[in-house]
Each structure stands twice: as structure tokens, then as C-alpha cells.
Amino acid sequence: MNSIQLIDGKEIPVLGYGTWRNTDPKECVDGVVAALAAGYRHIDTAQMYGNEALVGEGMRLSGVPREEIFLTSKINNNNHAYEDALQSIDASLEALGTDYLDLMLIHWPVVQGHEEDWRESNIQTWRALETAYKAGKVRSIGLSNFKVEHLENLLPHCEIKPVVNQIRLHPGVLQTETVAMSREAGMALEAWSPLSPLPQMLEDSSLVALADKYSKTIAQVLLRYSIDKGYIPLTKSVSAARIQENFEIFDFKLSEEDLTVLDNWQWQGDVFF
Ligand SMILES: NC(=O)C1=CN([C@@H]2O[C@H](COP(=O)(O)OP(=O)(O)OC[C@H]3O[C@@H](n4cnc5c(N)ncnc54)[C@H](OP(=O)(O)O)[C@@H]3O)[C@@H](O)[C@H]2O)C=CC1
Ligand SMILES: O=C1CO[C@H](CO)[C@@H](O)[C@@H]1O
């Protein structure tokens, strides 16, 4: 699969299979197996999702060698102290049944109940990621849901620079300032929940026509939009057919005009990010 080079020199596949809400054991394991069979080589999980053991099982059952898979997890909000973060990385490795992660992120910059001390807490959590990186337990380290003020606080304290910022990105949620600052700092952008607009777009005849023009589904157009913007979309399905559909996006490209149409599209959904 196509990949992007991160600022630490590692290669990251441009499309990832997400696993949020994959907590039913069979659905989770089968989803990972189906994604790897379809050709995905990038899996995104998190301590918060409670499914690391199932994701690891799916990876092993798939028969795809570990070294061919780019595997990401994220430090949960209750593991932000230095020692807690370090122990949680070991626990993730144990649950996943692997001796390294390709990428480990701080999942959220501000933890509920600790709104006052997020500045110091992010610095301590980052130190733990740097320690794990130096020990070879995580091959790249990065951030998730960091906005401008969180980046401004943390970046001056980073001995090792974060290589990605994983944030919500899709038509209707453009996060222009965060994208610009992340890029200035050399980070790649990962896009979570890229299919959020799908239900609304299916009701929109102009979007249906746009997808028809490319002989693609709206889901495929949304994933291609993300890639054409230079992002790394993470997408999730528990259906083998939709997992396959979402992978069939490497044989077309959206025109500049259509990217602009999507950038300007008015979303009526929630704004949680
Ligand atoms: N860092 C963070 O804070 C966050 C990270 N994430 C990560 O990003 C990943 C992606 O986000 P997520 O919201 O899960 O995923 P998506 O934006 O891919 O949306 C998934 C939803 O769309 C449905 N769907 C998937 N493909 C299709 C299709 N081709 N046609 C119609 N419906 C489809 C799925 O249903 P079905 O399964 O039935 O197909 C599911 O309901 C997560 O799984 C997680 O790994 C997500 C949220 C926050
Ligand atoms: O990755 C995520 C999945 O969903 C959670 C909400 O339930 C988010 O908080 C989180 O960022």
C-alpha cells in the first residue's frame, strides 16, 4: 500500500483500519483479519478501546507477518503520570502480544477531572513516550486531539519530536489552524471518523452525483478526500464487504474543484472533537 514518510524516517501506510467500538470479540477479531486480508497494513487501536488483546489475536490469525503491519495504540487518559504511562505501554505490548508498537500516541491532551494540570501532565506523559522510544518498545511517538494551545505548550519540551497528530478531520470539520500548526512542526495528520458525513451526504443529491461521476460510493469519496488532502484516514467497519469497499480508493483522485466542493460542504452533525 502507498505510504508516507514520517519525520523520524519511518513509513506509515496512508490508510488505516480503526477499531473503536469493536468490542464484540468475534466482530473485532474478524474485522482485523478481514482488513489484513483486504490489504490494509495499518491498524489503529487504543488502551481506551479495551480491545488490544482482540486486535493482537486478529493480527496473529491473519497470518500476515508482524513486521508488515503498522500498529498504533494510544495512552489512556488515566495513565498520564510518567510511571503510569510507562507501565501502560508494557501492558499494551502484553495485551497485543507484540514486543513493539509502530506508533504510540497521547490519546487526549486534557483529562477530565484534571483540567488544571494538563500542561505538566502532557510533558510527563511525553517523557514516558521518549523513554519507551529509546528502549525500542515504540518505534514512533505522536499525539492525538492536540489543538494549537496544547501543541504550543508541549512542543518546546520535546527532545524527540511527535511525528503525527491524530485528529477529527472530514468535510464539515476542517480544523484549519491545528492542521497548519501540526504541519509546521513536521507532523503528519491522521484523520479519525472520516466517514462521519456519510448519512447526511447520502441524502444530498449533489453529493450522490459527485460520487457517481467517479463511479465510486460516497464512503470511497470521503476516504479519497482525506488522502487527497494529504491526511491518513482511519476507517472502521465490521463488514468484510465494506472493509473491502473502503480499500478500493487507490484507482482514482478527486479534482481540485471537487475537493473545494467538499471543503465548503455544510455539515449538520455533532461537533465533538
Ligand atoms: N484519536 C481519537 O480520539 C479517535 C480515534 N478514532 C479512530 O479512528 C477510527 C475511525 O473512526 P470511526 O468513527 O470508527 O470510523 P468511520 O468514520 O470509518 O465510521 C465508521 C462507521 O461507518 C460505517 N461504515 C464504514 N464503512 C462504511 C461504508 N463503506 N458504507 C457505509 N457505512 C460504512 C461503520 O459501520 P459498520 O461497522 O457497520 O460498517 C461505522 O458505523 C476509529 O475506529 C479509531 O481507530 C476514532 C475516534 C476518536
Ligand atoms: O478514540 C476515541 C473513541 O471514542 C471516545 C469516546 O467514546 C473518544 O473519547 C476517543 O477519542
Image: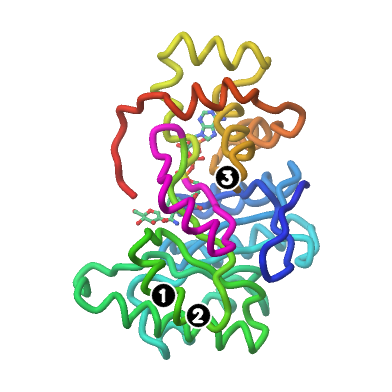
**Number of other residues with Cα within 10 Å of mark 1, as a class: few under 14, some 14 to 19, many 20 or more:** many
Q: Is residue 73 left or right of residue 149?
A: right
Residue 50 in the figure: left or right of residue 220 = left
Furthest toward the front, the residue is 184
Q: What stretch is highlighted in magenta?
A: 171-192
Residue type at mark 3 is Pro
Residue 60 is left or right of residue 184, and the answer is right
Horizontal and vertical percent position of residue 236? 54, 43
Tell whether label 2 touches label 1 (CB within 8 Å): yes
- Quarter occupied by residue 95: bottom right
**Callout 3: CB less than 8 Å from ligand 1:** yes
| Residue picked out by circle 1 | 154
> Does the magenta portion include 182?
yes
- Residue located beneath label 3 in the image: 233
The answer to which quarter of the image holds residue 233 is: top right
Residue 86: x and y in percent read: 48, 86
Query: Which residue corresponds to the image point at 60% horizontal and 68% vertical from the top-left?
Result: 103
In the rendered structure, which disc, 2 or 3, sits on the residue that comes first in sequence?
Answer: 2
Categorize mark 2 by other alpha carbons within 10 Å: few (<14), some (14-19), many (20+).
Answer: few
| SS for dot 2 | loop
* Mark 3: few/some/many CA within 10 Å (<14, 14-19, 20+): many
Q: Is residue 81 magenta?
A: no
Ligand 1 lies under 8 Å from the Cβ of mark 1 = no
Of residue 225 and residue 57, the one placed in the foreground of this image is 225
Q: Nearer the viewer, residue 8 or 242?
A: 8
